[in-house]
Amino acid sequence: MPLVNHSEAQRDGAAGGEVLSFAAVGCHGREWWTPAFALRGFGVAGRFASSALMFLLAAATARAQPATQDLASEFAGRVAAAMAPGATVHLVCTGDDGRTQLDLGRSLAARGIRLAELRDGATTVRCSCLENLREYACIADIGDGAARRVVAATRAKNSGGRSLPSPIVALQLRPLHAQRDPILDVTMAGSALLVLTPTTVTRIPLPEQAAVAPQSAAIATGRVWPRDLRGHLRADGDAFEVFLPGVTCRGSSMPFALACADEGESWPIGIENAGMAASRNTFATPEGFSFYEVAPLDGGQWLVVDQQGTLTFLDAQRRVVTRGDATDHVAALRSACTPGSYVVTARRSSDLESADVLRLARVVGSSLVPEASTIALPGVLTALWSARNPSRAQDDREAVAVVHDIQTGRYEAFHLSLSCAR
Amino acid sequence: MKRFISVCLALASVGLANRIVQGARPRYGGTLRVEVEATIRSLDPVAATSDTAEAAARARAMGLVFEPLVTIDEHGLQPMLATSWESDPRGARWQIRLRSGVQLHDGSTLEPWHVASALRVSEPAWMIAVESGAIVISPREPLPDLPWLLTDVRHAIVVRGSGGALAGTGPFRIESREPGRLSLRAHDAYWNGRPFVDAIRIEMGRSAAAQLSDLEGGRADVVAANALDARRITQRGLHVAASRPLDAIAVVFEPHRSTDTALAWRRTLSATVNRASMSTVLLQRLAEPADALVPQWLSGYAPLFAFDRGTTLSRAAIAALPLDQRELTLRVDASDPLAHAIADRIAVDAREMGFVLKVQAPAGLAPRPDARLLRVRVPNTSPDRALAALIERIANRDGGTTQAALSPAATLDAVYQAESQLLARSVVVPIVHLPEIYGLSDRVGTWNRPAVSASGAWNFADVWLRSGAP
């Protein structure tokens, strides 16, 4: 049985124990990461600039090449072979923005076929390069009447059926990591980036340790994950913990090891909680107040996203003080370079239905004051976790944002922080 | 001054609130209320259906309860209960490996023998065995594209228990069946994550008007709709969900109008139809103009049919035609208001060129028409299978005037040539491609994927309800 048509790993990586591959393949690969991500210290200005520049360059050069373009040469060869040497053709291609017409015209000209603007005296070649569910296909209908011929060049789709990478939009965020499989959270542990997915924790060494291959460890559990699965990582040096609904794992980055148990624990999110229920996507305070996300504020207060998707201020006794805007996400940000508490919230972009926009706001009493400009994300924000930066001042708060670009199927993790340099 | 600052802060906060849309983090719970026109008598995929409407509704509901080994999404073949498959080069013997740890609705674990038993019911002619934990299928004839065949709803894996109980692996299990109502309950141990809603209630036998009324009155969350209703739905602040184009609307000429001598006449009539206007205005951009039978997303070559190929008659030539050639009758299904509206639009276009086209929607016996407006479902599958199914369905309804040969697993150029051959005589004239359209209430939210997939399948496992349960 020589033909392996499909493997589960191509689709969603749901199989237990699957090893993910994270090659630093740059902008032309399906996975990318920023070589200068240098999370150690969560960002030096120079490294940030380098990272952002690389990101911008990648965005400019990594325009996704449609798979049909891969067929161009083969297609041109077949069309040329169907013509008499030195034939004159009137080329009419359709179904795209003129790219096929241009590419095929050039290729045919290189093969000695003459192109004519007018139909008179020339053989009409009608063509298109598109796709169906089975394959990418270029097809040409040559001539008319009895002399009519049809030639096609096709390439079967990967039965895993993933969409091709599309251009990455440069943002004023620091990209940390991107991959096809869902990302729940990322964090630095020792000298490596840890990436949490529904099935694995993967350790990705820093670029200066590129010789060390990424390592993955499966999250061993018998639980069926909730549909809106959430997970959180917390690292302290090389040691780290993984928090999932009804499951807690402990491990070390060096040597890389992971052990999981089906036990619920309080999650380290800055407010007392009993962990996440095994088949739900919410937390609850000891008083029974359910919420999705929390931003710890000064003075022992909290801003949470309650179960109705409303921003809610809680006082030091975790009582509701006031309710405000609708959002799905909130995280606290703080920097030594500016006084005051800030939060970042997310809303759906009015321009891009499948993308979210981050908005920064300053906390004044129990109100939010919009601050600075919005930041458009390349997709839907699926996770936003506040995180302390161990290398910075104790009060600094930063965040990790995970974005799902629905158009490309890509998950991207970003580092969010306050910058006073603008 | 302090008061002024406070007011400014308050206004800024309100401004932020106004710009933030309602949260989209999914919530668990509630009952999704769905209405369909057909009455589903049985969810068993091998049970006979009374008509195409019941078959279509059953296919949608079945997809919530039972799952196939392989499925299709907009990117092509995808694994479902199977994780991998392989065959010999001819496709005479297939080996399929199952996803592990999948729990059936009765609490037991899906085993290869369950799958083998289910497939033996749906395909009695196949040799099906279990070897080393894998399912081995030897079709009667080699099937090089068997995975595409396995995506068909009749190959969904159904475990038949004693007493006729049906168990599946899908995100919902059958809770109860009452006259006119099918109730489904969330499968808590669903292998791909528990659905957000707790239950689905499908009200059957609801007329299109009643469905629309229930949607507008807040008594239903998901109802079938057509393109003519779309504007009304959105104007009321509700939502429309649509599949990719799945129905081909085509004019098929009767045998007495299908002679070769009338070729230019038929081409002229075809050319009079303003498909673009029909799609954008009449059908509210929910339809695609069709020059080919197989929609572009399924064929990969449809734009090639947009090229003008044959001679047509001038207006003067049409005016000079004998009266019996300038007048024709187009028959439509009296129960399909959308088809009637399309036929009316065709009549307007034809009249502009000098034809007199009468639309006939007979409830009983009627004079022989010159052409029929057919609405044919195009299966979302490989291009060869899609075209083969279309040819079969049109041939069944046009008395066999349609002929085009297509071998199984045909290459794309062969499929294109077959469709070219089918359309060359303009006996079958594509008009538009229509999606499956649904009206959604404003409390329907979706998570990651739309409520209605590209193929029209109900993706209600990813639907959540914004407000409290009814």
Image (tube, helix red, strand yellow):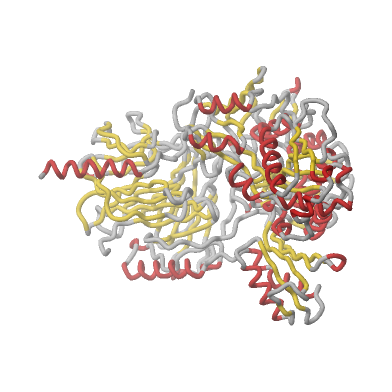
Residue appearing at x 56%, y 60% in the figure: A165
Residue B134 vs residue A25, the one in the foreground:
A25
Can residue B430 be seen at all in this image of the molecule?
yes
Q: Quadrant of residue A414?
A: bottom left
Q: Residue furthest top?
A: B179
Residue appearing at x 81%, y 66% in the figure: A144
Residue B433 point in image, percent of width and height:
68, 46
Can residue B144 be seen at all in this image of the molecule?
no
Residue B430 point in image, percent of width and height:
74, 48
**A26 left or right of B252?**
left
Which quadrant is the C terminus of chain A positioned in?
bottom left
Residue B189 point in image, percent of width and height:
58, 33
Q: Residue furthest left?
A: B1
Residue B89 vs residue B308, the one in the foreground:
B308
Residue B244 point in image, percent of width and height:
64, 46
**A406 left or right of B289?**
left
Residue A420 vs residue A188, the one in the foreground:
A420
Residue appearing at x 35%, y 29% in the figure: A288
Rendered position, A99 above or below B25 = below
**A252 left or right of B404?**
left
Q: Quadrant of residue B7?
A: top left
Residue B391 vs residue A386, the one in the foreground:
B391
User: How many numbered discs?
Assistant: 0
Which quadrant is the N terminus of chain A positioned in?
bottom right
Residue appearing at x 65%, y 24% in the figure: B204
